[in-house]
Image (cartoon, helix red, strand yellow):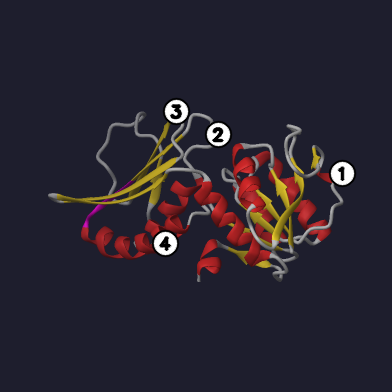
Amino acid sequence: MISVILHGCSGHMGAVVTDMIAKEEGMEIVAGIDAVDLGNRPYPVYTDIRSCSVPADVIIDFSTAKAVDALVAYGVERNIPIVLCTTGLSDEQLAKVEEASGVVGILRSANMSLGVNLLLKLLKEAAGVLVPSGYDAEIIEMHHHRKLDAPSGTAIALADSVKEGAGGGMHYIYDRSQKREKRDPKEIGISSVRGGTIVGVHDVLFAGEDEVIEFTHTAYSRAIFAKGAVAAARFMAGRAPGYYSMADVIG
């Protein structure tokens, strides 16, 4: 039986992961950690991460960026592998995560969806052909009005794949309102939309002369992210120290 600590258990994704693992064979949530205890989870919830001493095989994290530093320190101290799903981390935080992965296994992904991770691979190939041929790359991401970070971590990951596939040398533009000038062919434009209950839509456009090639991923529910996190938790349980990604899970 794989025992899981769910970090961020009281949030929307915490609810989805809780329900999904309840139906999983060979896996159970033994404790939750969150700043707020809703009193409706079927496991003990700790509002202070330092108070949780429940033994576990892996931690699944769907929290906020400000909670990640304490989580990483906790995982290192207790030698529990972490599936880190929170986005919006600073460069300093990412550096700390990478350093910690030398002590404990950490899997970090901007998006836990199988489809998105396949898209990351496809974009590298497409960008390698299209960008050198003069196609402009643009990314539009849409999420619900509760999402705190913009652009999304997934949008940045998609841009990174385009940049890598194009051979580097590109830079990201998040706002064109303050300048009036011709588009730089080395730009990757990234635009964010926030509204309603949109789970997640990511469009990647390659715009060339007289044609546009478009890659779109649409998430219709949070279940796809929970499913990926559960698969990642199975992969990470008992895993040696290292910095892992969903690419390792899907092979």
Q: Could you tell which of marks 4 and 1 lies nearer the N-terminus? A: 1
Secondary structure found at label 1: helix
Instruction: Indicate the position of residue 59 as horizontal and vertical percent values.
Output: 71, 54
Residue kind at label 2, given as amino acid type: Leu
The residue pinned by badge 4 equals 118
Q: Residue 85: x, y in percent?
A: 60, 50
The answer to whether the residue labelled 1 contacts the one labelled 2, judged by CB atoms less than 8 Å apart, is no
Look at the image and say whether residue 227 sits in the magenta stretch.
Answer: no
Which residue matches tag 2?
148
Query: What residue is shown with label 1?
Result: 51
In the shown orientation, is residue 70 left or right of residue 225?
A: right
N-term-proximal mark, 2 vs 3:
2
Check disc 2 and report its element: helix, strand or loop: loop
Whole-number angstrom distance, CA of label 4 to CA of label 1: 39 Å
**Disc on res. 196:** 3
Q: Which mark is residue 133?
A: none
Considering depth in this image, is 11 or 111 the residue closer to the camera?
11
- Per the image, label 4 sits on a secondary structure element best described as helix
Q: CA distance from mark 2 to mark 3?
A: 14 Å
Quadrant position of residue 82:
bottom right
On the image, the x and y values in percent for residue 65 come to: 64, 41
Work out how far the residue at label 3 is from the one at label 1, CA to CA, in angstroms.
36 Å
Find out whether the residues at labels 3 and 1 contact each other: C-beta distance under 8 Å: no
Q: Residue 246 lies in what quarter of the image?
A: bottom right
Three-letter code for the amino acid on which mark 3 is drawn: Gly
- Locate the N terminus by quadrant: bottom right
**Disc 1 or 2, which lies upstream in sequence?**
1
Q: Which residues are magenta?
A: 134-138
